[in-house]
Amino acid sequence: MHIRDLLTPTRTTPTISFEFFPPNTTEASDRLTDTLQQLTPLAPDFVSVTYGAGGTTRHATQQLVTHLKTQTPLSPIPHLTCVNQQSHDIDAILENYATQGISNLLALRGDAPRHTTITCNDFPFGIDLVRHIQKFNQRQFHPDPRGFGIGVAGFPEGHPATPNRLLEMDHLKAKVDAGADYICTQLFFDNREYHDFRERCHLAGIHIPIIPGILPITSMANLRRMAELSGGTRIPARLLKALHRVQDDPAAVQQIGLHHATEQTFDLLHHNVPGIHFYTLNQSQPVLEILSRVGWKSTTHTNLNRSYPTNH
C-alpha cells in the first residue's frame, strides 16, 4: 500500500511498523524467521529493511525485501542510500522494486563503510536521491501512477553533520519540497526531543507525517552500539542512572529498558503521533511486551511456514 494511503489526514489510529536488517549467518536467519513468526500477527502497517553503509548489504536487502513481499503478508519499505552509488545502480534497484510492486522507499544519504573512500558521488546528499526517485516516478515505470512513496530521516536531537539547527530544518524542508511523503525519526530516549522537533518542523513549514522511532533497550551492549551508530543519541540521566545501578543484572537491565520504552510509547500515543516505528534489532519479545503493556490488539495468528533464506 502506498504510504499516502496509510498516513491520511483523516486516519484516526496510529500506524505500527517495525525495522529489520538482513541476516548474515544461519543463527541470525533463524532468529529473524522466529521474529517474523511472532510479529506478523500484529498486522503492522509496514516494515522497513535496512541497507548497509555504502550499499554493503545491497543484495541481502533486496533478498529480504523480496521474501517479505512474496512470502509474507507484510508490506516492506526498503531503505535506499546513495553513498558510493551511481545513477544507473540506483535505477536498476528502482526498476527491480517497481517490478515487484514495492510501493515505498526510505531515501537516505547513508554512510560510507569504515576505512573506505567514497569513489563516486552522483548523489552528494539525501535530497539528490529524493529528486532522482521523483524523476523515476515521473517516467511512470511504476505500476502505481503516483510512483514510489518516499520517506526521509528526521533527527530529533539534531543531525550529527549539521550542528546549526536552523540550517538543518532548511535541509529537511528542501527534501520535503523535493517530494518526501513522510519522515521517520532516528531513535531517541527523551520524548521532549521529538515534541520539540515536531514543533520545529511545523515552524519550518513541514507538514508531512513525522513517525517517531523507538528502540527498546535490551542490554548495555545494545545501548552503547545503537547510541554510537545513531551519532551519539543522548540518554536521560535518570534512565542512565537506573541502568548503571543494575548493569550486572541483564534481566533487570531489560526490564528497565522495556519500562522506559513503554512510557515513551504511552506518551507519544497520548500526543497523537501518526505512528510508532520500532527498531527491533530482529528481536520480537521486547516489542511484543511493549505493545501488550500499552494494550495494542493483535490480529489472528498467521502461520508462516517458510523460513528466510540467507547467504553465509
Image (cartoon, rainbow, N blue to C red):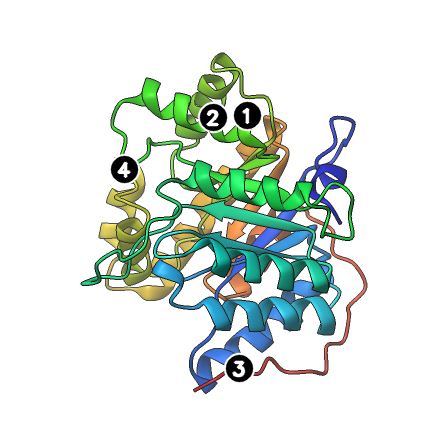
Mark 4 or 2: the one toward you: 2
Do tag 1 and tag 4 residues touch (Cβ < 8 Å)?
Answer: no
Query: Which residue carries the number 3 mark?
Result: 30
Name which of mark 2 and mark 3 comes first in the sequence.
3
Q: Residue at x 40, y 22 (%)?
A: 169
Residue sitting at the far top: 203
Do tag 1 and tag 3 residues touch (Cβ < 8 Å)?
Answer: no
Q: CA distance from mark 4 to mark 2?
A: 18 Å
Q: Amino acid at mark 4?
A: Pro
Mark 2 or 3: the one toward you: 2
Q: Residue at x 73, y 71 (%)?
A: 70
Name which of mark 3 and mark 4 comes first in the sequence.
3
Q: Position of residue 137 (x, y in %)?
A: 66, 44
**Nearest the camera: 167 or 90?**
90
Q: CA distance from mark 1 to mark 2?
A: 5 Å
Name which of mark 1 and mark 4 comes first in the sequence.
4
Q: Residue at x 54, y 21 (%)?
A: 206
Query: Which residue carries the number 4 mark?
Result: 160
Q: Amino acid at mark 2?
A: Ala
**Nearest the camera: 140 or 80?**
140
Q: CA distance from mark 1 to mark 3?
A: 41 Å
Query: Which residue carries the number 1 mark?
Result: 177
Task: Give the left or right position of residue 302, taking residue 254 as reference.
Answer: right
Name which of mark 4 and mark 2 comes first in the sequence.
4
Image quarter of the C terminus: bottom left
Do tag 1 and tag 2 residues touch (Cβ < 8 Å)?
Answer: yes
Corner quadrant of residue 55: bottom left
Mark 3 or 4: the one toward you: 4
Name which of mark 1 and mark 3 comes first in the sequence.
3
Task: Give the left or right position of residue 185, taking residue 117 as reference.
Answer: right
